[in-house]
Image (cartoon, rainbow, N blue to C red):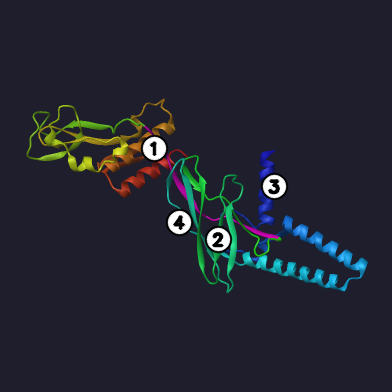
Amino acid sequence: MNVERNRIGSLVDRWLYRLAGPETGEIVLGQRRVFIVPTAAGWGFAAMLVLLFTGSVNYNLNLGFAFTFLIAACAVVDMHLTFRNLAYLHLAPGRAAAIFCGDMALFELQVINRRKHDRYAIWMDFHGHANAVAQAVDVAALGTSKVTLGVASATRGWLPAPRIRLVTRFPLGLLRAWSYWQPDLRVLVYPHPEQGAPPLPLVTTSTAHGRGMAGNDDFAGIRAYRPGDPMQQLAWRQIARVDPALGGLLLTKQFEGGAASELVLDFAAFPRMMDLELKLSRMTRWVLDAEAARLPYAFRLGALNLPPAHGPAQQATCLQALAEFALT
């Protein structure tokens, strides 16, 4: 039943609203894409016109006829202005930054007016979303305005922009003109970082000189703090870069002649029975913690095997791999 209903809805969209899927690039709201109907106030206004005309006929009131036709002409002008306020607008998608699951996905949209008259009180929202908040926009003649619409994210992966509805009742509110737009725009949703995740999985490995006394001449790297490490060997520069809100992270300088630590974020190292989303959530947290501490880290997820590194490129690659993992 639901499949048949969706198929019928898709046919209606194609025939009536001229929607055949996401629309790439800039589009124009032509005459056939703008619909107009009376509002509740408009129907009341029409009923008043009927009463005025009926009374004028019954009592042969010339002033009644004049007043009736005058306000009827105002309604016709209002119909033209309401339709013109929306027709031939140009719409283009803007930017959409990646977010973490549970955050609000923000879609930037451009409303372009290439006509010589101003556009007022155009309301835009996501059609079919009960919690969607409409945004009003005015567009000057030959100008451009930007609108940002948000929708809550519930799952990781690519979140396409929902169908956008544009509505206007300008200038008198007697009629309502509307149109739809399906922009080719999407947001990448990363897994939600786990709260209270275990510390980074720093692995201690032997250097070429074995595990004897650590020397103080050749710097070999940093590792997680262990009770008993001397205070003078704490890596204060790296510690200062760690956000205290993350719980802090004490690090110790490692000198050649002892043991060094390497950070490997390996999906295969998790227990097999562990929930998939929890694994991805924990790896997301570890990627963020490693970047906050400026620690180079290797990353292994499925066929992706990245050597130790850190920085915006490493973080973006890892988070995108986590967001898209096993979705196809």
Residue type marked 2: Val
Of marks 3 and 2, the one in the foreground = 2
Q: Tell whether label 2 touches label 1 (CB within 8 Å).
A: no
Q: Is residue 250 left or right of residue 279?
A: left
Residue under pointer 3: 8
Residue type marked 4: Arg
Magenta region includes residue 189 = yes
> Which span of residues is magenta-colored?
175-195
**At 45% across and 56% down in the image, what residue appears?**
95
Return the disc, 4 or 1, that comes first in the chain's sequence.
4
Q: Secondary structure at mark 4?
A: loop
In the picture, the disc for residue 95 is 4
Q: Residues within 10 Å of mark 4 (few under 14, many from 20)?
A: some
CA separation in Å, label 4 and label 2: 18 Å
Q: Position of residue 174 (x, y in %)?
A: 71, 61
CA separation in Å, label 4 and label 1: 24 Å
CA separation in Å, label 3 and label 4: 32 Å
Residue under pointer 1: 193
Q: Tell whether label 2 touches label 3 (CB within 8 Å).
A: no
Q: Position of residue 3 (x, y in %)?
A: 66, 41
Q: Position of residue 217 (x, y in %)?
A: 7, 39
Of marks 1 and 2, the one in the foreground = 2
Return the disc, 1 or 3, that comes first in the chain's sequence.
3
Q: In the image, is residue 261 above or below residue 80?
A: above
Residue 25 visible in the snapshot: no
Residue under pointer 2: 137
Magenta region includes residue 177 = yes
Q: Is residue 289 left or right of residue 66?
A: left
Return the disc, 4 or 2, that comes first in the chain's sequence.
4
Return the disc, 3 or 2, that comes first in the chain's sequence.
3
Q: Is residue 166 left or right of residue 313?
A: right
Q: Tell whether label 1 touches label 4 (CB within 8 Å).
A: no
